[in-house]
Every structure is written in C-alpha cells, then in structure tokens.
Amino acid sequence: MANWWIAEGGINYLTGTHTDPTNPVKLPDEYLIDFLRNIPQARQDLNLAYPDLLPAEKDRILELIALHPFLKFLRPDPQNVEDDFQHRLNTQGIYTTGPSGGKRFGN
C-alpha cells in the first residue's frame, strides 16, 4: 500500500524522535507541519501511518498536534464526529406551507 510519508526505498519520514540519537528525525517538524497544512493526501496518510509508529514517535506527532491547533482535526474523536453530524441534521431549516405554517390548526 502506498503512503505519502513513505518513500520508494521504504523510508518513513514520520519516524524519529528528538530525544533518541539512535532514531533521528527524518523530517524536521517545520516541514511536517507545512505538509500537513497544505497537502490533503499527507493529512489522510498520516492517519494510516500513525498506528505503525513507535510510542516515542507517536508522542512527537501528538506534541505537534497540541502545539498547532489547526492539526487537531487529524485524529478526531469519533464521538465529536457523530455529535457534529447530529447537530447538522437537527439545525436544518423546517420548510412548511399553508396559511397556518404547518401547525395544522383548524384541520
């Protein structure tokens, strides 16, 4: 399966941490943020690659998300997604016709 973050040679550019010299960062944080901000495929493929990262690498990604609020949508809480969907359904306009405005008075 192709992933935006994984090069043809198998290098995963999401891997690496700032704290472990044996696992250096492959891509600086600034580049990561820029790619996530501007490239939809990078955002989508981050969600696919995230489960395969080491715990320290996941922490690095979560720290970036915490520091940059626009990245919070990357890993949405399923309950929030469902709540937003229900909210959109419940706040649509109600179209009525007739002189009573759909209240069925007098019928």
Image: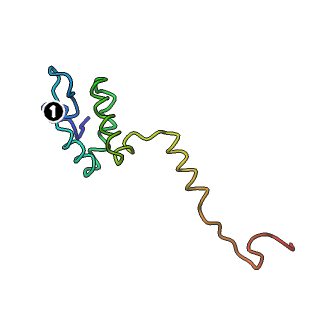
- Which quarter of the rendered picture does the N terminus lie within? top left
Q: Is residue 96 above or below residue 69?
A: below
Which residue occupies the extreme bottom position in the image? 99
What is the x, y in percent for residue 26?
15, 32
Q: Nearer the viewer, residue 54 or 3?
A: 54
Kindly identify which residue carries mark 1.
Answer: 26
Rendering quarter of residue 61: top left
- Which quarter of the rendered picture does the C terminus lie within? bottom right
Q: Is residue 10 left or right of residue 81?
A: left
What is the x, y in percent for residue 78?
49, 39
Q: How many callouts does the rendering have? A: 1
Rendering quarter of residue 100: bottom right
Q: Is residue 93 above or below residue 98?
A: above
What is the x, y in percent for residue 63?
31, 35
Q: Is residue 100 above or below residue 39?
A: below
| Residue count near mark 1 (Cα–Cα under 10 Å), binned few <14, some 14–19, many ≥20 | few
